[in-house]
Amino acid sequence: MTITIADKTFNSRLMVGTGKFKDFKVMQQAHIASGAEIVTVAIRRVDTGAPGHAGLMDYIDTDRFWILPNTAGCRTADEAIRVARLAKAMGINNWVKLEVIPDPKYLLPDPVATLDAAKRLIEEGFVVLPYINADPILAKHLEEAGCATVMPLASPIGTGKGIKNEDNIKIIIEQANVPVVVDAGLGVPSEASGAIEMGADCILVNTAIAEAEDPVKMAEAFKLGVEAGRKAYEAGRIPVKAYASASSPLAGVVGT
């Protein structure tokens, strides 16, 4: 079940977020139940003086979880670069989940600005994990630029619509030489399992866990879904057939 991203190896193929939980204690319990080892945090929420965010980092065990700073809320490449530099200056690490989202209604990432910011951040020594539309051409450009992963959305952030870009995600997986992390829009563990069965390397989930009726139980369910999906992928599914095929052999059947 291990996955290697850049120079680090993790034992879980599930990443989790920190937004939308009703309180930090529930968030903490959900993180533990998920079995995840990577937790993504919006840099603006690390500011302990920000209203409603005080104490966030007190509920994340940095000995247990690798923090993945993200640039949520940034609308331009320049903004995202400034926020990434801030995370590094705060001593978190040099990783960044790159989000450049100028669209306030559908929250779709800007492909041009994302590629621009990724190239500039990589030149500065950042490990860049870019959040993108499920665009195979863009994914390849980002990989060639030196990104550590590509992170195509399954459907728009927080919608719970599941995988609506399956064909494009399959192409990204087929062409990628870096881990593919399916991010955004998943609603239930079966969708995460399905993405992993397709060959995705990892899943990032936030809203589906945080806004579930029981976030802790849902976090555990996503853990199991991802594990099942990976085992199924490694096992190899049977081919799809046009006609029925009896599961019991006909040889030796007693006649009537």
Image: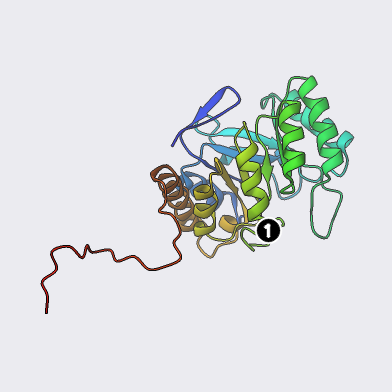
Q: Residue at x 69, y 57 (%)?
A: 155
User: Which residue corresponds to mark 1?
Assistant: 158
Residue 105 percent across, percent down from the top left = 83, 60
Q: Quadrant of residue 8?
A: top right
Q: Inspect the image, locate mark 1, and give the three-letter code of the amino acid beneath it.
A: Gly
Q: Residue at x 87, y 36 (%)?
A: 77
Residue 27 percent across, percent down from the top left = 56, 50
Classify residue 99 as left or right of residue 193.
right
- The way the protein has been coloured in the rendering is rainbow
Total count of labels? 1
Q: Residue at x 66, y 25 (%)?
A: 93
Q: Quadrant of the C terminus?
A: bottom left
Image vertical order of residue 57 relative to residue 145, above or below: below
Q: Tell me if I can see residue 246 in this picture.
A: yes
Residue at the far bottom in the pictured view? 256
Residue 178 percent across, percent down from the top left = 62, 32
152 or 157, nearer to the observer: 152
Classify residue 188 as left or right of residue 105.
left
Classify residue 144 as left or right of residue 113.
left
Q: Residues within 10 Å of mark 1 (few under 14, many from 20)?
A: some
Image vertical order of residue 192 relative to residue 6, above or below: below
Classify residue 144 as left or right of residue 177.
right
Q: Tell me if I can see residue 18 in this picture.
A: no
